[in-house]
Structures are given as C-alpha cells and as structure tokens.
Image (cartoon, helix red, strand yellow):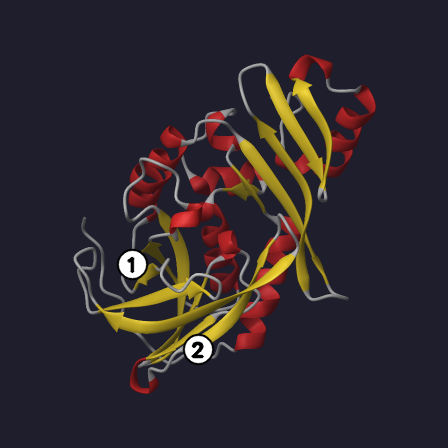
Amino acid sequence: MTFKKIKLKKQSVTKHIIEDALQICYDNISFSTFPYIVYGLKTSEDTIKNYNSGNCIGLSLFLKKYFKNIGITSYLIPASVPTIHMVPGVNHICHVSLLIPYDKDKFYIIDPAFYFLEPLDCQINNNVERSIKSVNVHNDVIEKVFYKLTAANEYNEHDLQCTCYFSNDPADVWHYYVQEVSLVYADTIIGDTFMTKKPEPFIVKTTFDMSSGMVKKAYHIKKVSNEDCVIIRGREQIYSGPISEVPKPIMKEIYMKLYKYFKKNIF
C-alpha cells in the first residue's frame, strides 16, 4: 500500500467546532451501503452528493468537505477495526476516518462510523493515555474509548499510529494510521472489499439528541436476502419478512422520513 505522509500544522480548530460538525453529520448523513450496492454508485463522492449517505469513507468525506468550507484542512486516513466490528474476510486496513491537525505536533482524529461524541486528541510531545466517549447506537450505550499514540507497525509506512480499545475489552485494539489515503484508493480497495464481503445492503439513520448528548438510532433497514428485509424503528423491530409484503403504512413512513437517502424504489 502507498500512503502520503501528513504534514501537521497549526490551524484554528477547536474541540467544540469538531463536536458541532459531528452532530451535523449524525443528524443529516446516514451510514448506508444502499447507494453502492443497490443503486450502483462507485464513489463516496457520489453517494454523499446524491443520497446524503455512504459507508465510513462517505461519512468521513462529508466531514472533510464541511471543514474545508470553513477553512480547516483535514485528511482521510486508513484504519483497522476492533474484532467485534470486523467483517470476515476483509483486510487488516479496512476502515477510513478523518485527521485534523491543530498544531505542528498535535492533531484530532474523528470516526463518525463509530459515532464518536468527541475527537481523539493526539499530542506527540505529551503522549499519555486519554479517553473519549462514543455511542453504541444499537443499544443506546455510551462506550469509553481509550487511546494513545504508538510506534509504527508493519501496516504503517510512516511514523505513528493511534492505538485504541473499548473500556470493556482492552485486548481488542484497533489503529488509526497517521498517513493520508486517497479517496480513489479508499473507494476501490477498502470500500469495494467491504461491500464484497458484506453484500446485503443496510442503512442506519441517526439523530443527535441535544437533551441527552447522545446519538440515537432512528431507523435501521437491512436487506437480508434477495426477497427479505428487516426494518427497525429506534430499538423496536417493526417488520421482518418478504420485501413484497412490507405493510403500506410502514413503507409510506420510510419514504416520508428517509426520502433523501433513497430512490423511490428502495430495494
């Protein structure tokens, strides 16, 4: 693999600005593989533009564009995932997130696909273990992520990586690699492999609840075979069975609530 080294620099970006951007993303952009698998789009640029949704690459790209519009430079970076989120058969580097420098030796990392509530604050010259909060939207639980910069491993062409683990399983680590990955490489290698190994399309629509400070799952729709689907509203499964037999009131609700993420013919 070939990645670019990232030159860190000082810029005016705060934790508060990043948290606001994450909330905007969770309210407006859905994690979805429908645009790629069902509608045949090849790039995350197109999935975000046409369906306000995408995989981990699409979500990170939305935030990269958001920051660019307010004068902040950021970089798509490659990553691994913890075993609990690993799709069988994918490569070690199977994920993409976003790095935002804020000084010559300091940077933030955010991962909207893991529903971070705040950025990882990585400081090369003050490298101590820190923690942030993320949300498991499928059970409404805040999960603490511990992290620290570590020396490069065999998957890293440059100097650093940020090594993370969830508080409930310190042995199940994953890494964010401090190097830039191109959008083309991300889509054609990382994204395509993920879709090949997980070919059943799904969408997770979230909202950010200001009162609780939590990301909430609004809808989760999965096509589990050529004929069948599962529809979840919040944490309640409201339908499971043949696509052709989805009750009309449920289908109408989906079109009304999620129209900007789909074509008229969802499946």
Image coords of residue 162 (percent x, y):
33, 67
Specify few, some or many for label 1: CA neighbours under 10 Å numbering under 14, 14-19, or 20 or more: many
Is residue 74 among what the camera can see? no
* Residue at 40% across, 65% down: 170
Amino acid type of the residue that numbered disc 2 sits on in the rendered structure = Arg
Quarter of the figure with residue 192? top left
Tally of marks: 2
Q: Secondary structure at mark 2?
A: strand
List x then y, in percent, for residue 60.
Answer: 46, 53
Report the residue at 47% width, 42% height from top: 55
Using residue 93 as the reference point, say whether residue 234 is left or right of it: right
Viewer-proximal residue, 251 or 91? 91
Q: Is residue 203 visible?
A: yes
Q: Position of residue 105 (x, y in %)?
A: 31, 81
Amino acid type for the residue under numbered disc 1: Glu
Looking at the image, is 205 positioned above or below residue 265?
Answer: below
Disc nearest the viewer among 2 and 1: 2
Closest to the observer, 196 or 180? 196
Query: Which numbered tag is attached to residue 130?
Result: 2
Disc 2 to disc 1, C-alpha distance:
23 Å
Residue position marked by numbered label 1 in the rendering: 180
Kindly state the secondary structure of the residue where label 1 is placed. loop
In the rendered structure, find residue 237 and report the number of the disc placed on it: none
Image quadrant where one finds the C terminus? top right
Horizontally, residue 49 falls left or right of residue 232, namely left
Q: Position of residue 209 (x, y in %)?
A: 73, 60
Q: Quadrant of residue 211?
A: bottom right
